[in-house]
Each structure stands twice: as C-alpha cells, then as structure tokens.
Amino acid sequence: MISVVIVGTGNVAQNLFQAFDKVVGVEIKQVLGRNENHLTFAKDKASINTDFTQLPSADIYILAISDDSIGLVAEKFKDIDGLIVHTSGATSLEILSKCKRTGIFYPLQTFTKGKIISFESIPICIEANNKKDLELLQNLGKTLSDTVIKVNSEKRKILHVAAVFVNNFTNYMYTIGAEICKENNIDFKLLQPLIEETAAKLDDLTPYESQTGPAKRGDQKTLHKHLQLIKKTHQRELYTLLSNAIKEKHGKEL
Amino acid sequence: MISVVIVGTGNVAQNLFQAFDKVVGVEIKQVLGRNENHLTFAKDKASINTDFTQLPSADIYILAISDDSIGLVAEKFKDIDGLIVHTSGATSLEILSKCKRTGIFYPLQTFTKGKIISFESIPICIEANNKKDLELLQNLGKTLSDTVIKVNSEKRKILHVAAVFVNNFTNYMYTIGAEICKENNIDFKLLQPLIEETAAKLDDLTPYESQTGPAKRGDQKTLHKHLQLIKKTHQRELYTLLSNAIKEKHGKEL
C-alpha cells in the first residue's frame, strides 16, 4: 500500500484524486488546499486539510499545483521525510531542492475542470534522485497507467514544448475553425468527425504522411480562393504562414 | 436502387467505392479512371473502365477527382442524362455547368490512401439545382451517413476553409511536435493520448473553453523557457505567433 497526500485543487489534483480513489494499493491520506471551498471534490471521500503546518505522514506528497506556486509551497514540505513530487511538465526537479527527497510525477495529458478521464493510456513521466524513490514512483504510476517512463528534466521540458504544439496550438486551430463557422452561421459540430479522424490517423501514419490539403498539393488556385474568403487579419496571417510552412516542408522533399 | 458510376482512383474514390459496395440500395455500375493500374482496387468487385467515350447509363455519376480536373472531365459527361456530381469542398457547382443535371456530394472528411473509414458519422454536404436531384442525393447520402445536409456552394467553401484549419493545420502542429521529438530522440507516440484527448474534449466543450497552456494563462516564464528550448526558426516563429494569438484571444475576454 502506497500512501499519498495530494496537494492542490485544480484539474490535475482532481483527476489524480479521482483516479487514485479507484485503485487498490493507494491510500489517499489527505487532500491539501488553501481554500476549503475548493476542496469539496474530495470532502466525502477523504480527509481534507487547509493547514499546511499540520501535515500527515505519507509515502508520497504530490504537489499538483500551478508552476508558479511549486517553489513557495515546497518550502512548507522541507522537513517532511516522505517523497515530495510535482506534476509539472515545464518545471525542473531542482525547484524542490529544499526538500529531503524529491521527484517528478508528470502525467502527459490535458486535464479539464469537471471532466474525469481514464489514466490507463496516459504516459506518466517520472524522475527522482535515487533508485529507491524512482521505484516508488514507478509503483505509484503503475497503479494508474500502462506507460510509466523515466524521463529526465531536460527531456520532460522538451516533451512539454511538443505537447504545447499538439495540444494548445492544435486547440487554437479548432478555435479558428469555430470562429470561421460562427461568422458564417455554420454548425462547428459538423467538423468534429474530421477533427477526430485527423487525430486517429496517427495510429497508422506519421504526421508527415498524414498531411493533405491545398498547401501540401501546392494548389495555388485553392489557396488564393481561400484567402479571398477569409476576412479577419489574424486568420489570414495564420493561413498564409501555415500554408507556406506546409508547402516548404513538402515541396522540399518532393 | 440507385445506380452510380464512380469516376476517379484516388482516396475519395476508393473510400466511396468501398462504402457503396457494402450498402444495400446502391449499385455501382462502373468505376472509371484513365489508368487501368490505378483501378485495381475495384477490379474484382465491379466493372472498371478507362474509356470515357463508353459511358454506361446510371442515376448518378460521382466525379471523385482532383479539383483541377473537374472542369475538364465534366466535358466528357455533357451529353449524359444522369446527375453529374463532384466531391470537392472548394469548387463551385458552376464548374459542371456544361452538363445537363449537376450537383455536389461532398463528404466532409480527410481520406487517406489505403485507409478505409466508416462514413456513418461523416457529414455529407449536398447541393443540386432542383428539388428532385437534391432528393436523389439525399437518398444516396443516407445510404452511407446519418448526417446528410443541404449546403450551398458559398457555405461549402467556408466549411472547407474551416476544415483546412482543423485538419491540415492541426496536422502540421502534429508534424512540428514530431519534429521536436525526433530532434531530441523522444518517441512521438507518447503524445498520442494527449492528441486524442485534445480532439475528444470537443464532445463537451467549445474550443474556446478547452484552451489550456502557458499562453492562455499568460505565463511569461514558461513561454520564455520554451523559446529557449526551441532551436529551429520556423518552430520559434510559430510558437511566438500562436502564443500571442492565444494570449490576445483569452486576455481580451478575461
């Protein structure tokens, strides 16, 4: 049995709580947050606590909090004997250096408020300063996910940059698609099967192989027609830049 | 029973052939293409033909060919009594104006060579010059899909622009994610659950609501750290432009 304390009340904390709450082999000792109202998600299922000076003992303390708060909050855990980990993709292990035993427990996924998702296929990237702690994180990760991998801080940050492209920026492409639909009174939901298939293609093909469209074909006529239809400056700018990038990428290697 | 002739040998033609081949209520009279070698996909299942002067009679002739060829190929169908339709998102109905009866049968989806997908959830956008032909296309569409909708040429072109953003440009975001992984010896497959969830979020949320990440949070520290990690110029340029666009979109409305 691994005992954990979850620190935080945001999307990651809530998703980790729901996931650990379901698995055998993990005991949630407590959920910690500054604001009691934000802790309601855990209220009837676990001990909750807003007092960071009264910490229970546990094997692992998971700081599932915003990147900016990790350093400050870690201060409060500096006398703790358990393993202190954070869940951030972009933050070094060193930020926890005032604590006795430190590590990373980074689930490579996008979490949404109120949407509880299954961890089974989510890669969990772990890091620790010694073999024993790494093994402990491995065991914790395995209770949730089929893919638990050791990733050092440098590679984790790179993965996080790649994640920004495939998630944050991809979602912004959806946002523009939705903008264009809204401006023209078209139901954005019509594009959802296309969006899903675009993602699903990666089961069989690399993104390079999956590329289609006028820019890839070098179809100037359609590119020109599209630019005539797009009225908003930021949409036109992106359309041109991305089409040129795709043309260059695929043209070069034709 | 609706009889169809499929003209073309590319991804759309092959996918339509496989789909119609499975449904009751549609008879594939012939598959037409200039190059016999490219017609092998239909060889054992239907009559194939490379001679555009020998056209069988059918209810509907589907020109599932490249945008650039539609005008030229349509010439060969100008004496045909059946309904001539094309499958392009970006091309007007007028391009078929030399034919007697014309229409559009545009499946809003991305098709990949060798990958046969189910049409059930794919919106099929139809257009025709009269009620009778529209009804015929409606009936044909319904044999494949739950969503057959009347969309005029203007709206269809707008939908196609939106599709370029959510499909072609999204796929380019995946390509950059894959580039970044490759440059750093990281398995791109690790990002696939994230990519799938990014698409799946749209079941419950608008893209605007789904947005996460450092740009949305206005987290300058992480944006700066990321730019230090990104070495390639086109990746840096896109990172900056897209982060600023997301900041502006979400900042404005905070």
Image (cartoon, coloured by chain):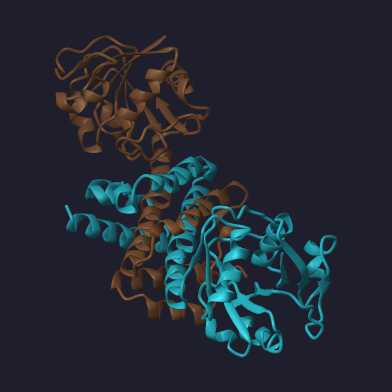
Chain colours: A cyan, B brown
Rendered view: A208 above or below A160:
above
Residue at 39% from the left image edge and 24% from the top image edge? B19
Q: Position of residue B156 (x, y in %)?
A: 41, 38
Left or right: A53 with respect to A135? right
Rendered view: A99 above or below B104:
below
Residue at 43% from the left image edge and 34% from the top image edge? B152
Q: Quadrant of residue A116?
A: bottom right
| Observer able to see residue B34 | no
**Closer-to-camera residue (A91/B55):** A91
Q: Where is residue B216 in the image (x, y as percent from the top left)?
A: 55, 69
Task: Tell how many labels.
Answer: 0
Which residue in the rendered view is the most extreme toward the front? A132
**Closer-to-camera residue (A52/B241):** A52
**Closer-to-camera residue (B9/A52):** A52
Rendered view: B8 above or below B201:
above
Q: Position of residue B165 (x, y in %)?
A: 40, 52
Left or right: B87 with respect to A55? left
Name the quadrant of the N terminus of chain A.
bottom right
Residue at 50% from the left image edge and 67% from the top image edge? B246
Q: Position of residue B126 (x, y in %)?
A: 43, 28
Which residue in the rendered view is the most extreme toward the right? A44
| Observer able to see residue B171 | yes
Rendered view: A58 above or below B56:
below
